[in-house]
Amino acid sequence: MDWQAVEGSFRDPSGFVYTRDGILYRQINRSFREPYEAFLTSGLYDELARDGLLISHENVGLDLSATVEAHAVIRPERVDFISYPYEWCFGQLQDAASLTLDIQERAIAKGFTLRDSSAYNVQFHGGRPVLIDTLSLEPWEEGRAWAAYKQFCEQFLLPLTLMSQRDVRCGTLLRNYLDGIPLDLGSRLLPRRSWGSPRSLIHIHLHAWAQGRYADAAVTSAAKGRSMSRKALLTLVESLKAAVRGLSWRAAGTEWAEYTDDNNYSVAAAQAKRNMVVDHIRKAGARTVWDLGANTGEYSRAAHEVAPLVISFDLDPAAVERNYRRVRRDDESGILPLIQDLTNPSPSQGWAGRERLSLAERGPADAVLALALIHHLAIGHNLPLERVAAYLSRLGRVLVIEFVPKTDGQVHRLLLSRPDIFPSYTKEGFEKAFARHFRIDARDPVVDSERWLYRMTAIPQSEG
Amino acid sequence: MYIDPTTGSLVLQLVAAGVLSAMAMVSRVRDNVKSFFKMLVPRRGRWTGKP
């Protein structure tokens, strides 16, 4: 077999995604021939791809197919970095939800419908959400209700409502509930005032009740012959759009979101550090950079001056939200902000633990930035320096890392509330621990501070 | 991808679409009534505003 299936696309009998010689392809199976051809000839594909709502593709020959069931093979435009809904901030999930509904609205107008509305079918590409599953659209049969309505509510509307009305950290429930947060659970978690909103009442609370009420009923008897007109379907989508648009979350006031405005750097030190970062990334020749602990993305933007793509990770939803809003405001196509807790990074999970990839499996990046991070991991979370070095060496080929000594005000603040049980947390101890996994290429003091900036190259596992 | 829409979800949609349509109609009627009265007020204002 000279092709490799892409994990996460195997559930759909209509087709699947695979790579051959490093190139990504999607096979459309014969069983989906008619809906797929109807989709192409309707002009809907052209419209969605032209407006950037659906990933565009090229048709290629059947000689590149993976199996004999192939009706057609396409080569979709490749998304640079696959992210998951449990890594998105509120604004990203909201934009992905709006995209899904925009597509459904346009599809209905052309006599089509989304047959699923999985949040995993949306990716951020060039700074914007885009649908990546070309096989999600099929002709709509007159009178048929929207099969993906429940999925939309569980994967988009309910998480957004919980994040907006209960706590933004409810978004992390999506990491446990990969198919979406169960409606009955969400209904119980939402505050009472949500019952007063007609849209939350219908799409979440009554929806959850109906799940239980008709759990064992057949569709034909429960529906009592009623069907869904096109106008009714559009009304439902319009209501969901208004519900999504009506939700908001104010990203301010958390410790990290304010960090950039309240740190130890003088203007000179900050500028010097910025120049050093750009220089190191340039010397690394990096095209993809992962900025770990990026906060609102100041240094991600510095790295982006020389690297086409920067994934800007932070654990704080408020910092990621502010970063994402800036990406949208300034139309920054090369920066992708994501939520990531490095002390508990995204694991590989889903069916057989292979459906959704871990953070490390989506690497390694050409370069990893770890600025003002090491003290939070080593002192804030008791992680031994050697283990931090070992993990970082798996994430990137080159590491640009800042060492923050105990004399620094930020470390001093961390040690105020705990005993200093970190005797090896010194510049020498840091270099010794990292030298086991990296070759240290450069070390320079940051002007006007006691910090040091290093550029290191990861030593391959077999040599380490 | 094939998903299970569940009976409860399908039934709720049918009912919800009807309710939402009715709400939209009521809203439209209310807006029309409002705009009718708004139209009357400035007209009266113009007449009474003349010396």
Image (tube, rainbow, N blue to C red):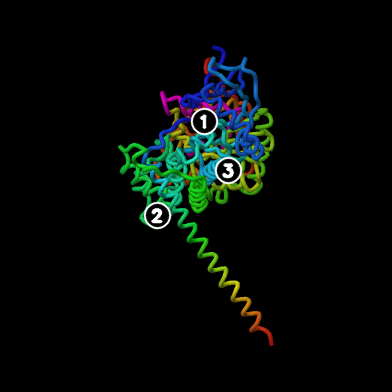
Q: Residues within 10 Å of mark 3 (few under 14, many from 20)?
A: some
Q: Check chain identity for marks 3 and 2: say if they share one.
A: yes
Mark 2 residue type: Ser
Query: Between residues A143 and A115, which one lies in front from this camera angle?
Result: A143
Residue drawn 57% across and 24% down? A26
On screen, residue A293 versus residue A58, left or right, reads: left
Residue B9 spot, x, y in % from top left = 39, 42
Chain hosting mark 2 = A
Of labels 2 and 1, earlier in sequence is: 2
Chain hosting mark 3 = A
Residue drawn 68% across and 85% down? B50
Q: Residues within 10 Å of mark 2 (few under 14, many from 20)?
A: some
Query: Between residues A295 and A59, which one lies in front from this camera angle?
Result: A59
Residue B15 spot, x, y in % from top left = 40, 49
Q: Which residue is mark 1?
A: A430
Q: Residues within 10 Å of mark 1 (few under 14, many from 20)?
A: some
Of labels 1 and 3, earlier in sequence is: 3
Identify the mark at residue A194; answer none if there is no mark: 2
Assess whether residue A352 is covered by the magenta stretch. yes
Q: Can residue A390 be spotted in the picture?
A: no
Mark 1 residue type: Phe
Q: Residue furthest front?
A: A225
Query: Between residues A188 and A67, which one lies in front from this camera angle?
Result: A67
In this view, the mark in front (2 or 1)? 2
Q: Number of numbered discs present? A: 3
Q: What element does badge 3 sit on?
A: helix
Q: Check chain identity for marks 2 and 1: say if they share one.
A: yes
Distance from disc 2 to disc 1, alpha carbons, whole Å, reads: 51 Å
- Region of the chain picked out in magenta, as a range: A350-376
Of labels 3 and 2, earlier in sequence is: 3
Residue A202 spot, x, y in % from top left = 40, 51
